[in-house]
Image (cartoon, rainbow, N blue to C red):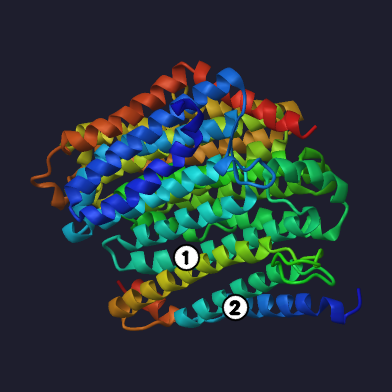
Amino acid sequence: MDTFGLFNYWVVVFLMMTGFYVVIASSNLVKKIVGLNLFQASVFILYISMSSVKGGSAPILEEGVTLYSNPLPHVLILTAIVVSVATTALGLAIVVRIREAYGTVEEDEIHRQDESL
Amino acid sequence: MIAAQLPVLQVTVPLLAAPACLVLRNGRQAWLVTLVASWITFATAVLLLMQVLDQGPLSYAFGDWAAPWGIEYRVEPVNAFVLLIVSGISAVLLPFAKSSVAREIPSQQVSLFYTLYLLCLTGLLGVTITGDAFNLFIFFEISSLSTYALIALGSDRRAFTASYQYLIMGSVGATFILIGIGLLYMMTGTLNLADLAARLPGVAETRTVRSAFAFLTVGIGLKLALFPLHLWLPNAYTYAPSAVAAFLAATATKVAVYVLLRFVFSVFGVGFAFDAMPLSMILLLLAIAAVLSASIVAIFQENLKRMLAYSSVAQVGYMVLGISFASVTGLTASILHLFNHALMKGALFMALGCVMYRLGTVRLAALRGLGFRMPWTMAAFVIGGLSLIGVPLTVGFISKWYLVLGAMQKGWWPVAILVLAGSLLAVIYIWRVVEAAYFSSEEASNLEDVREAPASLLVPTWLLIAANVYFGVDTTLTIGVARRAAELLVGVSQ
């Protein structure tokens, strides 16, 4: 359990917090989606990191190889990536409609327009 | 033969009907397909519940891969009951949806609306029936993604911002759930919920499991709009089309509450969640804050959909309050309230849908004198409101009764008083509507030629109102099932 062995998890936490911060702090709707993507990507890395088995080879059936990495998280995360892509697409589509309706993608400007109604 | 396939039919029927609607491209035909699919789903749910009450839990292994390896659908009293709620509300709502949707959604989008609606229904049913943690996440996202799109179909431009806000918060919540499931998988190597429950006690004393628990609780809390994570809900319900608001208010948060029950009681277990972790106190405080603050905010709303949305946040508070008692009575109250709140909020939002159909607005000021123009609609609203307050002979009374009973058993009498205070606040916000509709001195100017809503809207609304009264008087089914489900949930984990 040396620091380098946990390298992947440090990356995960760094990306996760960066993404989460951007989601909360940015007032630009497109940037928020970028942040969300970063946040989700960190979770993909978390899953893929946990599937590695020390000394294990790629999970392909071959003679003479008995130790494989766990392929299940890879498959799971493939599904989660699809979900994330769908979320991003839908989010950007909504941003396009917001831009058409308000003429801006800045959150505070949108609030100002709604309050003046 | 068919009986063994019921669990899978529950989800696949609406799932396959969704692309059929997309291909049809004709609003009327799409509606018909949706209606038939939804009624089949409801019949399936009724059969499943009967089967479960008769023979005990059912298990369905996908592709005959046995449970810990393959994906399992597992039906127990508690989720059979939630399946019944979701599919039942959908079955009653769809006849209502036809005219309401035709009025509020452009005709070329109607078939798309029903596609999304069916996907949302699929997702909610899938979350409820599945016995696999990752499957649960996927179904959650199927229902959430279609919900975001359904909300964005609202006619006001603020529907877009509401939908966007929900998308961001919902995705963060879903990702939290995903992290939680990942950490659990890391420690146990399994995704099957029953298998997780069996393996978790061995590794419960680790930081990873504790943080998994925290991630899951917060993630599910976002999905069920637990105070203070409820910020997406009022806008989403206010600007969504009326039929969508009615469907979501009656089903979406209920399913999330069920997931919380599932994880807290059958996966982590009472011992871990309530003794090793301070979940009881956290849920108790948040639930009370939800009941009081959301009820007070509801009193000051001018838009009635928004008022009901805040009231929903308060009602979710009652459900979570029951969970925080961690006793059979408290849990019975929560599960009962899942059912009862679906009935009352479904009915109230449908009554507002009738108002929206005739008036095109649900602002309080526009409703002055409406009680005489639309007597049936407003009478429905009043009875639904009484049920929300918890007047005897309505379902609201039954769940409040059990909640107070649960608090008393624990010796938490201040909590019981706060539950009653919440009811009094509900009296105030419902009374404002009654006062405007029946007792205002002059009629609003927009009511000149307003007539009663058509029968296609009124009949489903009154069906739910009748259910509000019926299940408030004859409680054998609801209390029987809720108690059995609660005993099983608490018993499993002891």
Name the disc covering residue B469, or none: none
Mark 1 residue type: Leu
Mark 2 residue type: Leu
Q: How many marks?
A: 2
> From what the image shows, is residue B382 above or below residue B72?
above
Q: Nearer the viewer, residue B51 or A117?
A: B51
Most extreme residue toward the left, as rendered? B449
Residue B133: image location, x then y, percent: 64, 50
Q: Nearer the viewer, residue B93 or B141?
A: B141
Q: Nearer the viewer, residue B410 or B74?
A: B74
Instruction: State the residue at coordinates (71%, 67%).
Output: A59
Residue B155: image location, x then y, percent: 26, 62
Numbered disc 2: what chain?
Answer: A
Name the disc covering residue B167, or none: 1
Which residue in the protein does label 2 denote?
A38
> From what the image shows, is residue B89 above or below residue B311?
above
Q: Quadrant of residue B461?
A: top left
Label 1 – label 2 distance at C-alpha: 15 Å
> From what the image shows, is residue B247 above or below residue A3?
above
Residue B136 seen in the current view: yes
Most extreme residue toward the front, as rendered? A63
Numbered disc 1: what chain?
Answer: B
Position of the N terminus of chain A by quadrant: bottom right
